[in-house]
Amino acid sequence: VQLVESGGGSVQIGGSLNLTCVASTYTSCMGWFRQAPGKEREEVARRDLNAKIRYADSVKGRFTLTRDVDKNTLSLQMNSLNPDDTAMYYCAAARTWCPEGSDYEYWGQGTQVTVSS
């Protein structure tokens, strides 16, 4: 399974970005992770095989995860961005159930998001 991310960039505080991940084939679980310099990779949002969506507390109310199963895409609409959101964002996928932590089978190369004042 190949995952290709797009949509990253540089924005000012309060701005918005929409990240998109395109998968080469269907997987039951897909999600977004991020990793800032010097920090561990953290889960941002994920959608499991039952279409249940989970968000990190730090992004609830600001980020929206959507999936187009027919197109094998996963999008992350990010609003009200702040400097703490600056990180490399990675798309991840698993064939069946969503693993806990970052133990996903497939990963994209990442797309950089930078939020500045």
Image (tube, rainbow, N blue to C red):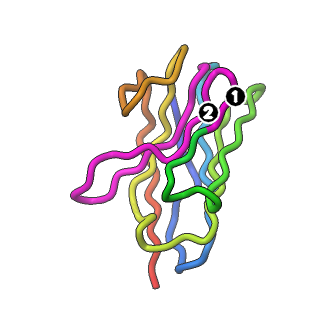
Q: Amino acid at mark 1?
A: Ala
**Image coordinates for residue 109, horizontal then vertical, percent:** 41, 41
Q: Which residues are magenta?
A: 27-53
Mark 2 — residue?
47
Kindly tell me whether residue 1 is visible in this rendering. Answer: no
Q: Secondary structure at mark 1?
A: loop
Q: How many residues crowd around disc 1 within 10 Å: few (fewer than 14), some, or many (20 or more)?
A: few
In percent of width and height, residue 84 lies at 41, 68
At a point 62% along the width and 46% down the height, the residue shown is 20
Q: Residue furthest top?
A: 96
Q: Which residue is mark 1?
A: 51
Residue 65 figure quarter = top right
Taking the magenta stretch, the answer to whether it contains residue 69 is no
Q: Quadrant of residue 67?
A: top right
Label 2 secondary element: strand
Residue 94 point in image, percent of width and height: 50, 21
Q: Amino acid at mark 2?
A: Arg
- C-alpha separation, residue under disc 1 versus residue under disc 2: 6 Å
**For the residue carrying disc 2, how many other residues have a C-alpha within 10 Å: few (<14), some (14-19), or many (20+)?**
many
- Label of residue 112 in the image: none
User: Is residue 46 one of those drawn in magenta?
Assistant: yes
Which one is nearer the viewer's eye here, 112 or 92? 92
> Answer yes or no: do the residues labelled 1 and 2 have beta carbons within 8 Å?
yes
Does residue 21 appear to the left or right of 104 in the view shown?
right
